Amino acid sequence: MAQVYLSLGSNIEAEKYIRSAITVLKEIYPDMKVSCVYESEAVGFQGDNFLNLVVGFETDLSVQGIHEQMSEIEEMHGRLRGSESFMARTLDIDLLLYDDLILEEDGLHIPRREIEEYAFVLLPLTELAPDLTYPLTGETYSEMWERFDKGDQNLWAVDLDY
């Protein structure tokens, strides 16, 4: 069984799509852990604020299997893919970690570099796995959050029942 962590985000009817995605994922992975939900400003474009969180679970699926499963869940939730990487979306699910695997192929980048770059990814991941180590540096997520420059990225916890 592999330990997997995913980042979920939405800024189009965000509460609706985040709730629905969590429901679908819990049906597949009933023991899934869910972080707090955070609201943050759009990054890289002008748009509505995003809701973001991280989930973690164990699975027998391969990396490619998880990637395909998450793409299907995104499509179920009306995800449209465009050429722009920074755009509004109903649901974005990124595979952050798959055990301690380091992979750069077939469009998959594991671990996702967003872990190092964005508070809305690192903080909820730190909540779920504070003592887990980042495969690229060996630092724990708590250590990474401790030294993270929090001045540029505003985010705040949102009370979202699901």
Image (tube, rainbow, N blue to C red):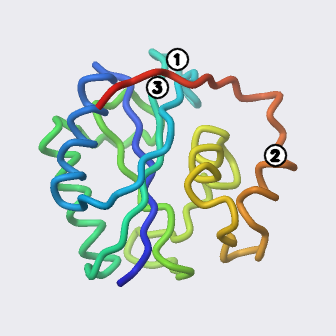
Residue 144 location in percent, x, y? 78, 56
Spatial separation of the CA atoms under disc 3 and disc 2: 20 Å
Residue 143 location in percent, x, y? 82, 58
Disc 1: which residue: 46
Foreground tag (1 vs 2) = 2
Quarter in which the C terminus is drawn: top left
Q: Secondary structure at mark 3?
A: strand
> Which residue shows up at 53% across the image and 29% down it?
38
Q: Farthest residue in the left direction?
A: 76
Q: Which mark is residue 19?
A: none
Q: Is residue 114 left or right of residue 81?
A: right
For the residues bearing labels 1 and 3, Cβ distance under 8 angstroms: no
Residue 17 location in percent, x, y? 25, 30
Q: Farthest residue in the right direction?
A: 147
Q: Secondary structure at mark 1?
A: loop
> Which residue shows up at 42% across the image and 47% down it?
34
Quarter in which the N terminus is drawn: bottom left
Q: Which mark is residue 50?
A: 3
Going by the numbered disc 3, the residue's amino acid type is: Phe
Q: Is residue 105 left or right of residue 126?
A: left
Callout 1: 10 Å neighbours few (<14), some, many (20+)?
A: few
Locate residue 156: give its quadrant: top right
Going by the numbered disc 1, the residue's amino acid type is: Gln
54 is higher (above) or lower (below) than 89: below
Spatial separation of the CA atoms under disc 1 and disc 3: 11 Å
Q: Which mark is residue 148?
A: 2
Q: Using the image as rendered, state which of residue 86 and residue 101 is in the foreground.
A: 101
Callout 2: 10 Å neighbours few (<14), some, many (20+)?
A: some
